[in-house]
Image (tube, rainbow, N blue to C red):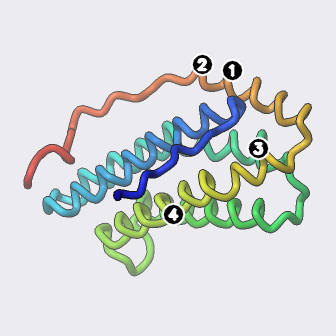
Amino acid sequence: MAQQIKPIKRSKELVPLSKDHHDALLLCWKIRQGLKNKIVTERIAAYVLCFFENDLMSHFCQEEELVFNLLPARDTMKLEALKQHDALNRIHMSLKNQTGTKSEEELLHQFEQELNDHIRFEERELFPYIEKNADPILFKESGKQIEELHQRHECFVWEDEFWTTKK
């Protein structure tokens, strides 16, 4: 008998962030598709940079200000999430400025892997931990603020669907 995967039940306060995570996992898939299909890395990197600057930066800020701060300053789960955000920010800057010794393809692969791992960490470990340990009143207030921010957010349009083509 095939093993069934139970969907993660998420509190309504964190649902908008989990929806962002779905979009970010789709970004990871697009990067993998582009690299697999030998798409010119500049096309993939342009999309990653746009996605990062239009979606992920504000997502990270919301998490850091409205969710992670529900935990004590020295909480190991919080510190791990912040460390992961920092690593993704550094890769973003390397891609943007073409700095370092890694090729653009290596940076894209590293970004995809670290973002995928980060999302899995937040969804499987950090968010359940926060739901269990955060002060319920502060958690509810953070959820309201997250919802308001998501209602105002506009999606960007990207016309170069590199992930659907080969070369």
Badge 4 marks a residue whose secondary structure is helix
Amino acid type of the residue tagged 4 in the rendering? Asp
Badge 3 marks a residue whose secondary structure is helix
Seen in the picture, residue 92 relative to 7 is either above or below; the reply is below
Label 4, label 2: how far apart the Cα atoms are: 27 Å
N-term-proximal mark, 2 vs 3:
3
N-term-proximal mark, 3 vs 1:
3
Label 4, label 1: how far apart the Cα atoms are: 27 Å
Relative placement, left or right, of 149 versus 101 is: right
Look at 28% across and 53% down and name the residue there.
44
Q: What residue does disc 4 label?
A: 117
Label 1, label 2: how far apart the Cα atoms are: 5 Å
Label 3, label 4: how far apart the Cα atoms are: 19 Å
- 10 Å crowding of disc 1: few (<14), some (14-19), many (20+): few
Amino acid type of the residue tagged 1 in the rendering? Glu
Q: What residue does disc 2 label?
A: 151
Q: What residue does disc 3 label?
A: 67
Amino acid type of the residue tagged 2 in the rendering? Gln
Look at 76% across and 54% down and name the residue there.
129
Seen in the picture, residue 74 relative to 96 is either above or below; the reply is below
